[in-house]
Image (tube, rainbow, N blue to C red):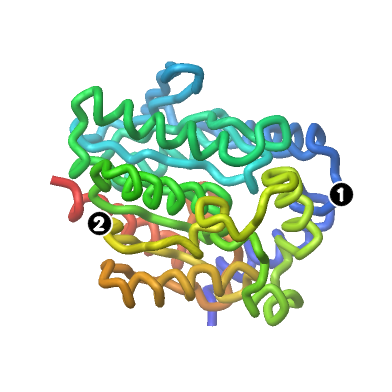
């Protein structure tokens, strides 16, 4: 059973899902503006430092709290199904992860679909990682992290680095990642009734924006289908009640088969990106996840 606090949050989120940004068939502009307006209401603690910058043509923000070790970087790829989300809307999320991981958090404003379809976002993420290396940040002091579509970008970035012969980061954290754009996993059917945040129509719409006419079987569009050998250790979080459950379950199975260290945490009775929810609305399961994420980063970085 989930905690009473989590049950209360779940009930509230379910009651508001029909009017939220995740409903299908909204215009891109409406979806983005609603999400930004919602996240703008979250207050940022007074001790959080935000520094805007750019890496080539990619706008970025550094977010840090007083506890950070400046040598340690968490490269955070925000969610939003490749269509919405930004540095600004993820400041409070980044601040929480900075505090728990004791790392500086770098959030890139990678290019969004449909204006910039695949592989534009992936190219931006790779460029930002390479910039960190070129700036003297050691790969053993970098952890990649992403939620939802950002989780897919995280895995695709790791695969791209391996293909290019570039060093892997110290580790990676994926939260409810969208890894298979073919939408063929059984959980898209078996979890359809209990997932109040996501649905097949939404994923089909976002896939069309992101890929246009490109093949969803492409290993960098659907990195679950890629060669995963030689990737860095991973920590994966997913909810038992989301249609993307099997993306994470299958990833963990494939990583173990190839010898990549992986830890899969399935939140029973919990929803899509539930550890992200805990960054602004604490509940026991979420707080434990944040603490575990912090320990993962600190133990894998030198």
Q: Where is residue 18 in the image (x, y as percent from the top left)?
A: 83, 57
What's the residue at 74%, 47% (across, down)? 213
- 62 lies left or right of 67: right
For the N terminus, give its image quadrant: bottom right
Q: Which mark is residue 295?
A: 2
Q: Which residue is drawn at 24% across and 35% down?
A: 68
Front-most of 155 and 237? 155
Viewer-proximal residue, 6 or 183? 183
**Above or below, 84 relative to 176:** above
Indicate the quadrant where residue 166 lies.
top left
How far across and down, in percent of the image, does residue 292 sit?
31, 61
Viewer-side label of 1, 2: 1
Instruction: Give residue 25's mark.
Output: 1
Q: Is residue 288 above or below residue 281?
A: below
Residue located at (71% from left, 30% from top): 115
In the picture, measured across the screen, residue 196 lies left or right of residue 141, that is: right
Q: Position of residue 95 (x, y in %)?
A: 41, 37
* Residue 282 shows in this picture: no
């Amino acid at each position: 059973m989930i905690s009473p606090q989590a049950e209360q949050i779940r009930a509230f989120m379910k009651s508001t899902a029909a009017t939220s940004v995740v409903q299908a068939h909204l215009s891109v502009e409406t979806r983005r503006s609603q999400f930004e307006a919602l996240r703008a209401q979250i207050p940022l603690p007074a001790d959080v430092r935000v520094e805007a910058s750019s890496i080539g043509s990619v706008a970025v923000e550094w977010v840090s709290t007083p506890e950070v070790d400046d040598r340690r970087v968490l490269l955070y790829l925000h969610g939003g199904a490749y269509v919405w989300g930004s540095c600004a809307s993820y400041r409070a999320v980044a601040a929480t992860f900075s505090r728990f991981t004791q790392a500086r958090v770098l959030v890139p404003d990678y290019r969004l679909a449909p204006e910039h379809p695949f592989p534009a976002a992936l190219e931006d993420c790779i460029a930002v990682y390479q910039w960190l290396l070129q700036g003297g940040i050691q790969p053993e002091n970098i952890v990649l992290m992403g939620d939802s579509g950002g989780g897919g970008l995280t895995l695709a970035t790791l695969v791209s680095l391996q293909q290019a012969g570039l060093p892997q980061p110290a580790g990676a954290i994926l939260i409810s990642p969208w890894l298979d754009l073919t939408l063929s996993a059984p959980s898209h059917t078996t979890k359809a009734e209990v997932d109040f945040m996501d649905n097949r129509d939404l994923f089909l719409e976002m896939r069309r924006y992101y890929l246009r006419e490109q093949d969803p079987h492409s290993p960098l569009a659907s990195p679950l289908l890629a060669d995963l050998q030689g990737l860095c250790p991973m920590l994966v979080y997913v909810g038992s009640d989301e249609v993307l459950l099997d993306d994470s379950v299958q990833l963990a199975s494939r990583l173990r088969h190839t010898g990549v260290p992986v830890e899969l945490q399935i939140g029973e009775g919990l929803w899509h990106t539930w550890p992200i929810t805990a960054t602004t609305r604490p509940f026991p399961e979420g707080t434990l996840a944040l603490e575990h994420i912090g320990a993962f980063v600190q133990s894998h970085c030198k």
